[in-house]
Image: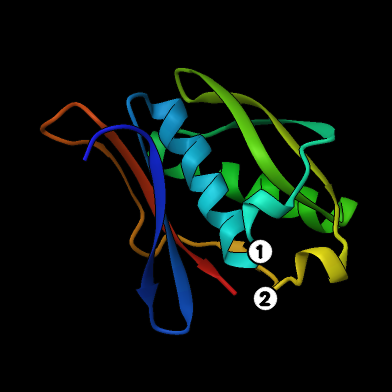
Amino acid sequence: MGGVYWEHFPHQADMGVRGVGPTLAAAFEQAALAMTAVVTDPASVAPVMAVGVDCEAPDDELLLVDWLNALILEMAARHMLFSRFEASLHGHRLHATAWGEAVDVEKHQPAVEIKGATYTELKVEKDETGRWLAQCVVDV
């Protein structure tokens, strides 16, 4: 299966999020979308407000955790959910914009609150077909 996608994988009481794409940035964007999908259907979240996110880490794996945790922080601080992400990577620095809207309990029916991205099952790698995979477990 080609292209860009996200998926969940079960991990005890928590949830694994995985993003796949042709570039590292695309895989990071899909991992963020997978994280939104743990909470609600991303299609129900209107991308009406833009929020900038910047992270830096010593390697790609730590950068993924920092990126997801930065989004979790923004979600909590702004009471928002995000459904669209545009990330660019320069070495181990990430600059991104996340679009979303304020949480509406009626509309979004949030299933859980994500407490944080963890180092469990943390993996960022290029597979034999040249696609990037970015995954970790989020604490719910």
Callout 2 touching callout 1 (CB < 8 Å): yes
Q: Quadrant of the C terminus?
A: bottom right
Disc number placed over residue 111 in the picture, else none: 2
Rendering coords of residue 97 (x, y %): 70, 28
Residue 72 versus residue 105 in the image, above or below: above
Residue 17 versus residue 26 in the image, above or below: below
Residue 118 versus residue 47 in the image, above or below: below
Which residue occupies the foreground of this view, 8 or 14?
8
Q: The disc labelled 1 sits on which kind of residue?
A: Thr
Rendering coords of residue 60 (x, y %): 40, 35
Is residue 63 among the parts visible in the rendering?
Answer: no
Helix, strand or loop at disc 2? loop
Question: Which residue corresponds to mark 1?
Answer: 40
User: Residue visible at 24% across and 34% down?
Assistant: 2
Is residue 92 among the parts visible in the rendering?
Answer: yes
User: Residue visible at 32% across and 25% down?
Assistant: 22
Rendering coords of residue 4 (x, y %): 37, 35
Which residue occupies the foreground of this view, 42 or 25?
42
Helix, strand or loop at disc 1? loop
Question: Could you give the CA–CA distance between mark 2 and mark 1, rounded to whole angstroms?
Answer: 6 Å
User: Residue visible at 40% across and 56% down?
Assistant: 7
Q: The disc labelled 2 sits on which kind of residue?
A: Ala
Q: Quadrant of the N terminus?
A: top left
User: Residue visible at 38% across and 51% down?
Assistant: 135
Name, please, the residue furthest toward the top.
Answer: 90
Describe residue 36's horizontal placement relative to residue 78 as left or right: left
Rendering coords of residue 131 (x, y %): 25, 31
